[in-house]
Image (spheres, grey):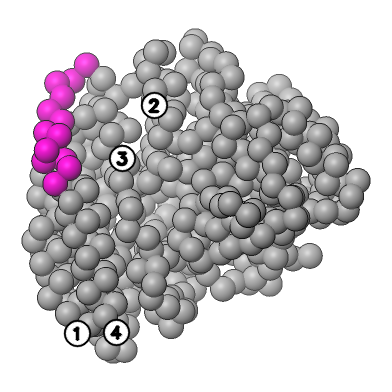
Amino acid sequence: MTRPGGRWQNWGRSESVRPRRVEFPRTTAAVQRAVVAAATQGIPVKAVGAGHSFTGIAVAPGVLLDLTDLSGLVSTDVERSRVTLLAGTRLHQVPALLAPYGLAMENLGDIDRQSIAGAISTGTHGTGLRFGGIATQIVGATLVTASGDLLVVSDTENPELLPAIALGLGALGILVEVTVQCVPAFVLHAVEQPEDLAGVLANLDARVAAADHFEFYWFPHTDRAMTKTNTRLPESAPRHPLAPVGKWVDDILVGNGLHQVACTVAKTIPATIPGINRLSVKMWGDREFTDASSRVFATARSVRFREMEYALPAENVRPAFDELRALVDERGWRISFPVEVRFAAADDRWLSTAHGRTSGYIAVHRYWRDDPTEYFEAVEQIMLGFGGRPHWGKMHTLDASILRDRYPRFDDFVALRDRLDPERLFANPYLERVLGG
């Protein structure tokens, strides 16, 4: 977010910058003018959404374009279940925009504060073996290029560029509109419960294959996992949502309020972490409800943290997870945040972490006031050994020399970048590291 005085910092407080200039464009034409002005002055320009990336992917030392006001519904194609949204539209705003048309996004992650452009540009995803990341739902886009011109990608215009533009890291231009392939509105039957970790791991492949959406959290220093299993049902199915008081207790009081207290105590007295984690497993989850898809997918998060997540070939999730558990024991660390495990279908987006392979995701977190470096870098070495690809919006240490070998279309993407932004108007230090100069 942009603060008074022009200083910008991300949600996780892992990145900040004081841009030379901050602008709040409300229209596509305003974005074009800003890009042309920046190019004329020789100043780099970057668009920023909600700032939910933990990496420096959105850091804008030159001109920062805050897209908060570039938000809303542009058009609807009811016959094909498609909607075009302005790039700054937040994911949590989308359900209300789609509701009058009986539509929903096919899948979502567990946080919905991001902008639609930021979410697809960083490879944000949910879980479900038969469903791709949010970028796979994009069927068209309009991009402002370094020349200030509009590049339209659709079924009939430049369709071959969609796999690059839909997940472009902000390196190819500034997205101003995206067209989303939606599905008929649906509800989810959610079962969230603590289980023995050993049982979850022993039947992991079957659980993932059988469910529409399955994930689990493991609290270090315990032998328990919290599982989440969501089953898709028609929009007409009976709903049994959580009672408002119960939802507030689970998500706000326990999930955020008490967790904040626990993290503060753990920061001061690390020896308390195993006991706190065992208590957390008992207090979180263990509920069953049915509600609109968007209300089930996303969970409110107010406790700040930092995160690293790696995508692995799905068959490598179990051995990588086992090594992670052993690592925590061997190092004697005290880790207060759970480890999250999710899954996604293979896709064709050039820089997608699931490009060409069915994938599982292992995410590790640290409270934002704790230094994550030692933990994250040791876990990263495990993930790299199992063919891991880092989430573009979450912390990692890799550069282009390593990433190139992990993405079959990496050089194609760089070549497209050379064509669309030869002077690197949209570059920043993070992109220089992960894509090269």
Residue 49 numbered mark, or none:
none
Mark 1 or 4, closer to the camera:
1
Number of numbered discs: 4
Residue 271 numbered mark, or none:
1
Question: Would you say residue 326 is visible in this rendering?
Answer: no
Proximity of marks 1 and 4: CB atoms separated by less than 8 Å: no
Segment colored magenta: 236-249
First along the sequence among labels 4 and 3: 3
Proximity of marks 4 and 2: CB atoms separated by less than 8 Å: no
**Distance Cα–Cα, label 4 vs label 3:** 31 Å
Proximity of marks 3 and 2: CB atoms separated by less than 8 Å: no
- What secondary structure is marked by label 2? helix
First along the sequence among labels 1 and 3: 1
**Distance Cα–Cα, label 4 vs label 2:** 41 Å
Residue 95 numbered mark, or none:
2
**Distance Cα–Cα, label 1 vs label 2:** 43 Å
* Frontmost residue, 179 versus 305: 305
How far across and down, in percent of the image, does residue 399 sit? 64, 70
Residue type pointed to by label 4: Trp
Q: Residue furthest right?
A: 40
- What secondary structure is marked by label 4? loop
First along the sequence among labels 1 and 4: 1
First along the sequence among labels 1 and 2: 2
How far across and down, in percent of the image, does residue 328 sit? 29, 82
